[in-house]
Amino acid sequence: MASPPNLEKPTKFVVVGGGIAGVTCAEQLACQFPSEEILLITAAPLIKTVTNFKQVSKTLEDFDVEEQPSSVLEDKYPNLRVLLSAVKSLQTKEHSLQTEGGQTVQYEKLCLCSGARPKLLTRDNPHVLGIRDTDSAQEFQRRLCKAKRIAVVGNGGIALELVYEVEGCEVIWAVKDKAIGNTFFDAGAAQFLIPSLEKEKPKKSLPCKRARYTTETDSSSHSPKGKSLDSGEPGSALGPDWHEGINLRGADKVSHRVHVEYQCEIQHIYSQEEFLLFCKYDTFTKKSVGQSVTRNPLIISCSNKGNWPVYIQLTNGKIYGCDFVVSATGVVPNTDVFLDGNNFELASDLGLRVDEHMRTSEPDVYAAGDICTACWEPSPLWQQMRLWTQARQMGWYAARCMAGDILEEPIELDFCFELFSHITKFFNYKVVLLGKFNAQGLGQDHELLVRCTKGQEYVKVVMSGGRMMGAVLIGETDLEETFENLILNQMDLSSFGEDLLNPSIDIEDYFD
């Protein structure tokens, strides 16, 4: 059993956050400074750890994320201590912070890795659920098993995974864009993936054997179940395979039925009582009621008996009744608890601004992961996205920068920030994103080359001035390393034209 941290004297390195960024940062510091005590503060007894790490190419990383008791870290690193408590306040001038448990922690260097919280449609509606951490995922599972229809609002990674994985329940999916997955790929890739929503999913060959843990209220840490490390919000983000081992089946016999409503958002959310009043007393104009309630067969079929717990009105005029609503509309950096009395500079997305050494505007305070916004001049081939791969990279790099500051050693911007790269899985397809994969920031000065084999692969490259700037690879293409090299080398490919994606030409022979 690890001894409790000594809070009587200043701690050289303090990290706040039990997610991927925070744990990675704390582990790296513990390795580099084995004689120094490293303190990790987290409200959640379960911390996120990176396992099965594989360096796929120069910049592509593939790994699993596991939840483990915080004691695992203390057993692995004798100089790393975990303090289970939420943070109450921070005084950067005094280099100290206070926890909800009443402790005062003095630090020399502090790294804030408290992640982000869901950007919920509404924060006070019991029928609206955000999925961000393990507790909210378990709450979703509990509600889903009794549900026959749910509404999913959003078009990011959580929404994409959820609508595909849910079975035994009808899904109404409201997206604000013209195509699904707009955050990750274009309309062509979306059309390639859409048929996967309409067919039976392949059987999973092996059950998930990963250990799972539950959390209970810990009176000693003053951190109730479901509260996060720093602001009373849900805890650290789910890993890339959050749905593995969770039964995502509803109460209906239907296997997999998804209805997508494009280019619309939520206009209003009604409880059952509010909706019945709306229908009875004509609270909107007669034109609205006539078009949206009495004449539209979609509306009549799902709401004529008034037996749904909640109703959503979309901006396209349609109304759907459902058992509950999943809000998957993005996140907001978890900064609130750190701002009072301090002078942190915030970016336009409300993240803490950090420079090329992960330093915030306050001295000796660093930040990594979803809480921060990279405000240095980025590489032409890189952009920040709040993904688990970047959380790991930022946490690791922040630790290097903190160490370099202490040791007075120069630190160059890590190579991982040279090229955006991400590997994941959507709709049971391997998905690789490289560089400016959606032509971000290129304006009209680009062209797209596409190769598609229905049900097998979708390959898109973004070209500008004869040079490859980005790529989307869906399926087992085995092109990621070759395309990564082409993007990094910025070789002039004009002479190849459309033959660059000709399947009869093995381009690896030319460019590897």
Image (tube, grey):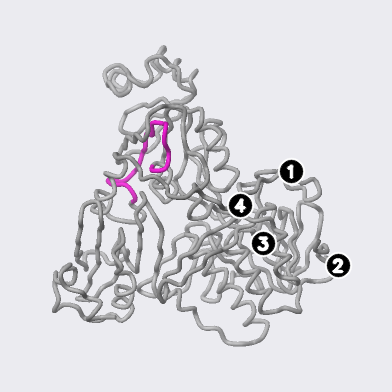
Q: What stretch is highlighted in magenta?
A: 164-181
Q: Is mark 1 on a helix, strand or loop?
A: loop
Distance from disc 2 to disc 1, alpha carbons, whole Å, reads 26 Å
Q: Residue furthest bottom?
A: 409
Front residue of 54/325: it is 54
Distance from disc 3 to disc 1, alpha carbons, whole Å, reads 20 Å
> Disc 3 or 2, which lies upstream in sequence?
2
Name the amino acid type tagged 1.
Thr
Distance from disc 3 to disc 2, alpha carbons, whole Å, reads 18 Å
Q: Quadrant of residue 72?
A: bottom right
> Disc 4 or 1, which lies upstream in sequence?
4
* Badge nearest the viewer, 4 or 1: 4
The 10 Å Cα crowd at callout 2, few under 14, some 14 to 19, many 20 or more, is few
Distance from disc 4 to disc 3, alpha carbons, whole Å, reads 25 Å
Which quadrant would the C terminus be assigned to in this image? bottom left
Q: What residue is drawn where x is 66% and y is 79%?
A: 32
> Disc 4 or 3, which lies upstream in sequence?
3
Name the amino acid type tagged 2.
Glu
* Badge nearest the viewer, 2 or 4: 4
Q: What residue is drawn where x is 56% and y is 64%?
A: 345
Disc number for residue 8? 2
Q: Looking at the picture, how far across and down is residue 421, in whole percent?
A: 39, 68
> Disc 2 or 1, which lies upstream in sequence?
2
> Disc 2 or 4, which lies upstream in sequence?
2
